[in-house]
Amino acid sequence: MTPKDHSRAVLITGCSSGIGHAIALRLAKGAWKVYATARKPETLKELADAGCRTLALDVTDEASMLRAVNQVEAEAGAVGVLINNAGYGQAGAIETLSMNLIRKQFDTNLFGPLRLTQLVLPGMRRAGWGKIVNITSIGGKLVFPGGAAYHGSKFALEAFSDSLRFEVRPFGIDVIVIEPGLIHSKFPDTLLASLETDSGPYADFHAIMNRKTREMYHDRLPTMLSGGPDSVAVVVEKALNARRPKSRYSVTASAKLLLAVRSMMTDRGWDLVMRSQYRREKSPKKQAK
């Protein structure tokens, strides 16, 4: 099968805003047939006007995923490229999070991409070609305090991608990981909205998390090292057009800097830096047993 015979159908999740929206817009300008999806397809009007095919897809709903994949295969023969982008951040000390919140985090950030991958692989194998792009994060390689649920899901997505790469390479399928750093989008707003404030033992810690997150996305130096959603879209397009794409692409100066720093530090050293940044302003009150 020659390159021109490959399916140019690209199925992208989480396109209502941010990175997914930017990827869909950029690829629609190229030679790709873009299927932009979101839980609420009415949020995709701009993408429809730009030439994207828009579909409803909820990565936590099996029937929704099946309908979307079946529709793409009916119209294009196979999903040529799957871009697992849908995701969000759940913040908070792990003791304060209900198991429902933790399961929701993993359902969206890990199990949804995993199941969609299972659904598109038969078509890709039959075609002898395909690309699976997983949008992870530098949060899949290093951690910040208060993000255990989010980081756990992203670390798992990285590991899933590495194992999958070995399994599907014999069928002509590439697995590509995209690791964004600080991106100007709705992500920090969603992250902060998930952070519960209370008067319990973690109240001070949560207050510090709130402040540090705002500083990270709005202070001058971090802003200089960050990028917009289209900076991720540019890298995704580059990876899709590469004859031999890399396994991983980090995006933004903040990603490259933080990943380099973390790789040179011991766990104890990183913990020390995090403690200095997230130091409590006052000692927590002793809790009654």
Image (cartoon, helix red, strand yellow):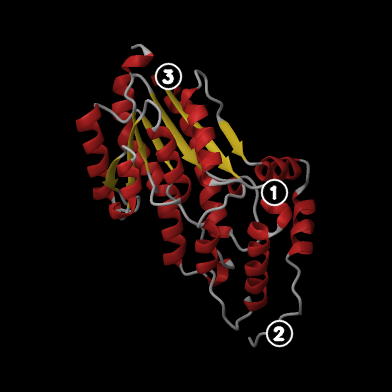
User: Residue at left 55%, top 29%?
Assistant: 247
* In front: label 2 or label 1: 1
Q: How far apart are labels 1 and 3 at the CA level?
A: 42 Å
In the structure shown, which secondary structural element does the residue marked by tag 1 occupy? helix
Give the residue type at disc 2.
Lys
Name the residue carrying label 3.
170
Q: Position of residue 37 (x, y in %)?
A: 33, 46
Q: Residue at x 60, y 81 (%)?
A: 200
Quick check: can you spot residue 194?
A: no
Secondary structure at badge 2 equals loop
Residue 288 position (above or below residue 219): below
68 and 140: which one is in front? Answer: 68
Give how far across and how far down residue 207 sits, in percent: 64, 74
Q: CA distance from mark 2 to mark 1?
A: 38 Å
Is residue 125 left or right of 268 when viewed as pictured?
left
Kindly state the secondary structure of the residue where label 3 is placed.
helix
Q: Nearer the viewer, residue 105 or 211?
A: 211
Q: Earlier in the sequence, mark 3 or mark 2?
A: 3
Type of amino acid at the residue the image marks with label 3: Pro
Question: On the picture, is 7 further left or further right than 174?
Answer: left
Amino acid type of the residue that numbered disc 1 sits on in the rendered structure:
Met
Which residue is the site of mark 1?
224
Q: Which residue is mark 2?
A: 285
